[in-house]
Amino acid sequence: MLLTIIFLFGTLIVLAGIILLVKPEVILDLITEHADNPVMFGAVIVMRLALGLLLLTYASLSRFPKTVIFFGWIAVIAAVAIAWMGQERFSSLVKWIAGEIQPWSRVGGGVALLFGLFLLYSFL
């Protein structure tokens, strides 16, 4: 069951990467539009923390346990950092990043696509 959740995360990351590659303004507009939403703030923290803990817990079942552990810790640290910065600073950061990343959004989409595919391949 929990491995299914990892597959779900991987699939969603792949889909986000594809959307960023094809039509990046869809995701960038969505992010900036909801940057002030407290539900988004909480969801970002919970999703990163959940993914990180799942990766740390199930890394031994993957093809690349050390790499999966590394990404798990990155996700956990990101969740803690976002929670620590608070919603107001998080919202400002998200809006600033969305504006600055516009020219590089397709590169980010490629990275997201590769990371999602890595997750899927690691646990197949």
Image (cartoon, helix red, strand yellow):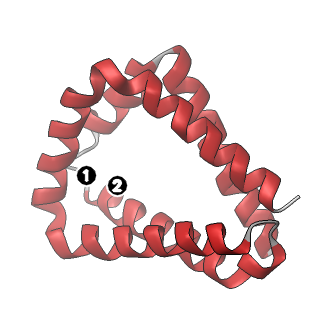
Per the rendering, the mark at residue 84 is: none
Q: Which residue is mark 2?
A: 40
Tag 2: residue type? Met
* Residue count near mark 1 (Cα–Cα under 10 Å), binned few <14, some 14–19, many ≥20: some
Report the front residue among 112 and 89.
112
Q: CA distance from mark 2 to mark 1?
A: 5 Å
Which residue: 30% across, 18% down?
Answer: 103
Whole-percent x, y for residue 29 in the image: 32, 26
Which residue: 70% across, 50% down?
Answer: 118
Whole-percent x, y for residue 113 in the image: 61, 36
Tag 1: residue type? Asn
Which residue: 82% across, 66% down?
Answer: 63
Left or right of residue 42, residue 47 in this image: right
Vertical relation: 76 (above or below) 99: below
Vertical relation: 38 (above or below) 115: below
Per the rendering, the mark at residue 37 is: 1
* Residue count near mark 2 (Cα–Cα under 10 Å), binned few <14, some 14–19, many ≥20: some
Q: Secondary structure at mark 1?
A: loop
